Amino acid sequence: MSSPALSSFDWAVMAGTIALIVVYGVYKTRSASKDLAGYLRGGDMRWYTIGLSVMATQASAITFLSTPGQAYEDGMRFVQFYFGLPIAMVILCARIVPVFHKLNVYTAYEYLESRFDLRTRLLTALLFLLQRGFSAGVTIYAPSIILSSALGWPLNLTNVVVGVIVIVYTVSGGTRAVSQTQKHQMIVIMGGMIAAFVYMLSRLPEGVAFGDALDIAGAAGRVNPVGFELDPKTRYTFWSGITGGLFVALAYFGTDQSQVQRYITGGSLSQSRLGLLFNGLLKVPMQAFILLIGVVLFSFYHFHPTPVFWNQPALARLKAKGSVALLDAETSYQNAERERRAAARALVAARDRGDTSAAAAARRRLVEHGAAMKAARVAAKAAIKRADPRTETEDADYIFIAFVMGFLPRGLIGLLLAVILSAAMSSTASELNALGTTTVVDFYKRVFRKDRDDKHYVLASKFFIVMWGVLAILFATLAALVDNLIQAVNILGSIFYGTVLGVFLVGMFLKHVRATPVFVAAIISQLVVVAVFLLSDVGFLWYNVIGCGLVVAVALALQGAMRSGARAS
Amino acid sequence: MTSHPGPQRDDGDERPPILGRWSVLYAVVIGALALQVLLYYLLTSAYAR
């Protein structure tokens, strides 16, 4: 299971794939930067470019590194989180995208000035810059920490290389380059994942078919894409996906400039709508497919030895310290794994013979030895935490990369690394593009320098994209010094998302509410959410609901009070 | 700069290039979701042990 050094052929495939996509994207869009509309809105994108660009923006490197590992540990139930997304796409197409198109906006926040006033626009744009500015750093940092640990690459070098390449093509070709590049990145990403899946199936032992793999995973409860239970403690169910998932998707696709900028690039309203519906059709099956890779990987590893802790360089380092508890846990894990392998082979043989009672007995043994392995892993993680409290014991992110490095043939390893780096670049490019656009359009051009020509604003846009890119790289470089940084950024996002969504919902659906009530409601909501964060232990996903609900309720109450006051006077 | 950068566009009545009406396309997307949920439910049931 040790990770081999990357061959020169893999280096060539990885670097060649990335260079080809970037150079072609820059070449195709070299004339896009003449005027501000061309630079920031990207011209007349076709629906398939918009759809792929929207999908590439949402799917970061962590999506492809973490999701198979998540399915390995928890099965396919995470797919339900995306059930609200197609419904959100329909709502956006029917109610929100036509408004953005009619107003001919560059940013989502411009709409809020025409609907309410300048201060509401600036407040929401500022909240976006804060939240997305931090998360751009994490988009670069999160895959770097896994690649540096699994492959021994220098952490800061990975941060800088990914960041600088993205800055170069985002600055040179603007929004058009981002979308064009994302189209090809998405094709490489899906091609690479399909190739890894097919190769994984081909490497199952002789006589073990896809159906056997599903049966093995099913015995351990991993084939669980839908559940209708009403238990609120179960995070991913049909109900939470169709409600909470809808809420999150509406907020993300409707109010986050990194997504809005992708679909307002459409040459017409029809192209934008078709791009979003394309995303609505393909996102759920794409996510299910990535989870299925993790499920088949789970079965695959029933026939190959696995480590007790997937971050293997960290495991080797801690074993060298001579922790007896860790070595004991590893021995228990390996013993249980041998038994589980025998049970898996017995299950396949029983299925071949059509012996249902022997198959049922083998499934029971699979569950029993799987539970023993899980207990040994818990003990190993506890020993690791005691030996080095700074070591992160969540190791699911390392499962898929361990397979890539340990089992894929030369060439395919390079392609999969190109997939991961392409995903990191595509998400980061959208973020930098949106951060630069919002800074120029909502602040620089609107407030500070109102009457300059397009050439000046294009230059300013390039300057701000570089500024945000350098900040993102610096943030990613300093991130290693902060514990639980990814969670911190997720929390930060949830603190702001609810308020911004609330303002947009009031704007779109409560036509009688005026500017002052919604602005005051947004300030109150934001203060309450920050207070909830500081003073309570409410789960951070609920901040979205609290923030949005408060904006709507307070704005309605204030509007009602103002109307009553006006009548009385 | 005004509240929006250019002249307002009025392309709200554009018809989709396929299936005639946007409401039909929306129904296709929701229908595809319903079909997938059914498929995933059958998969879950088939391998629930």
Image (tube, helix red, strand yellow):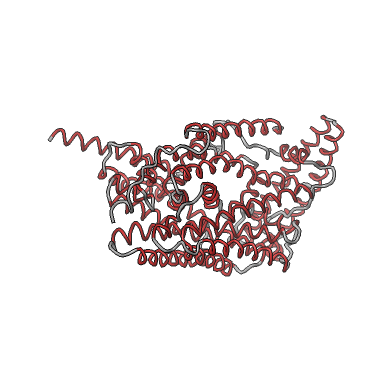
Q: Residue at x 68, y 30 (%)?
A: B45
Answer whether residue A509 is visible to the viewer in this image: yes
Residue A380 screen position, x and y as percent: 68, 54
Residue A338 screen position, x and y as percent: 81, 48
- Which of A221 and A172 lies nearest the eye of the viewer? A172
**Is A501 left, or right, of A67 in this rendering?**
left
Residue A249 screen position, x and y as percent: 48, 43
**Is A509 left, or right, of A163 in this rendering?**
left
Q: Considering only vertical position in the picture, is A430 above or below A512?
A: below
- Quarter of the picture containing the N terminus of chain A is bottom right
Q: Residue at x 44, y 40 (%)?
A: A92
Can you name the residue that lies furthest to the right here?
Answer: A353
- Quarter of the picture containing the C terminus of chain A is top left
**Is A284 left, or right, of A545 in this rendering?**
right
Q: Considering only vertical position in the picture, is A271 above or below A230?
A: below
Q: Residue at x 24, y 35 (%)?
A: A560
Looking at the rendered structure, the number of numbered marks drawn on it comes to 0
Answer whether residue A248 is visible to the viewer in this image: no
Residue A112 screen position, x and y as percent: 32, 47
- Which of A371 and A347 lies nearest the eye of the viewer? A347
- Which of A472 and A549 lies nearest the eye of the viewer? A472
Can you name the residue that lies furthest to the left here?
Answer: A569
